[in-house]
Image (cartoon, helix red, strand yellow):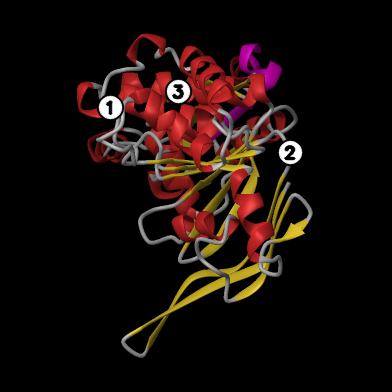
Amino acid sequence: MIQFQGVSKIFNSKNKEIRAVENVTLNVGRGEIYGVIGFSGAGKSTLLRLVNLLERPTGGKVIVNDQDVTSISARDLRKLRRRIGMIFQTFNLFNSRTVYGNVAYPLKLARVPRAQIRERVTELLRFVGLEDKAEQYPEQLSGGQKQRVGIARALATSPDILICDEATSALDPETTGEILKLLKKVNEEYNITILLITHEMHVIRSICDRVAVMENGAVIEEGTVFDIFAHPKQQATKNFISSVQNDKLSPKLLDILKQHHSGRLYRIIFKGGTTGEPVLSQAAKKYDIDFNVVYGSINELQGQLFGSLIVEFTGSDAEIANVVRELERTVELWEVVDHES
């Protein structure tokens, strides 16, 4: 559906090169919800704008629906853009047009007959839950309602792809959850591929199938959401995951552990069926050591349970080594060196 093949984008500013995107290779499958996450300046917004050639890549290829967007004619590019809907952080609605007029606008540009426009707009406003707001203006709407109008407008021309540029970052948490559910509904009911960028890991965790983590213009990690949460390799990825799991030991707790505990700390990752099994207590009993759960959390990711514990083991080095070997048969664990997670 969407392929980035060694794509780079360089901007020149005051005789200085800014490498916004650096040799990115990604494949977004048809029907996926694919997330790109990164801190400000990571290059994710630029990457998004390469899909419909709002920015032209300096190097590499961008393939959309089996077409190299960098080599197609202007006419074919216009056709392609009609198959790609966009949702913006700031909504980008026309304040002078009603809700109906905003959703109808791309259909009017495409010279769709008036009766078909009315039918399509009515259908979409019902889909996003705003059928009673058709004659209102954007200034009369809440932020969540404005974004629903933006989603309806993006769907007007029946696109294959929906691009979301920080679509929820201007919304409160409750409204964010509602918009994410709506995007999931769009994906499932219209079978639309969604490519979204965000700096919020809870957005990725909530609806994405796969995710790419960007830093300094490059993709530093990529995979299914479950695998990224279960096996984060890069520090930036670990920072994002910690922001939603809240499993990083606080400085106060670190001090207490250093001063009053002589045991060794391990992080243990439980996945799938192991989250409900007493593997920890069984191993501790078998080798006669004590353990203390310092922190624990269980989440559901892509229909699978994922648990993370920070555990203190107290015993001899040999006994702890035996427990670690026993646990490694069913779970993942590693020592938290110097009491830092």
Coordinates of residue 37 in the picture (x, y in percent): 48, 47
Q: Residue furthest bottom?
A: 15
Q: Residues within 10 Å of mark 2 (few under 14, many from 20)?
A: some
Circles 1 and 2, Cβ within 8 Å, touching? The answer is no
Residue type of the residue flagged with mark 1: Gly
Residue at 43%, 60% in the rendered image: 42
Residue drawn at (53%, 35%) of the image = 107
The percent position of residue 193, horizontal first and vertical second, equals 65, 36
Quadrant in which residue 289 is drawn: top right
The vertical placement of 264 against 72, above or below, is above
Does any portion of residue 133 appear in the rendered image? yes
List the residue tagged with mark 2: 30
Measure the C-alpha gap from mark 1 to mark 3: 35 Å
Earlier residue among tags 2 and 3: 2
Magenta extent: 267-279
Numbered label tally? 3
Residue 199 vertical position relative to residue 5 in the rendered view, above or below? above
**Residue found at the very far right of the displayed protein:** 66
Secondary structure under tag 2 reads: loop
> Which residue appears at 71% of the width and 70% of the height?
71
| Mark 1, residue position | 143
Which residue position holds label 3? 296
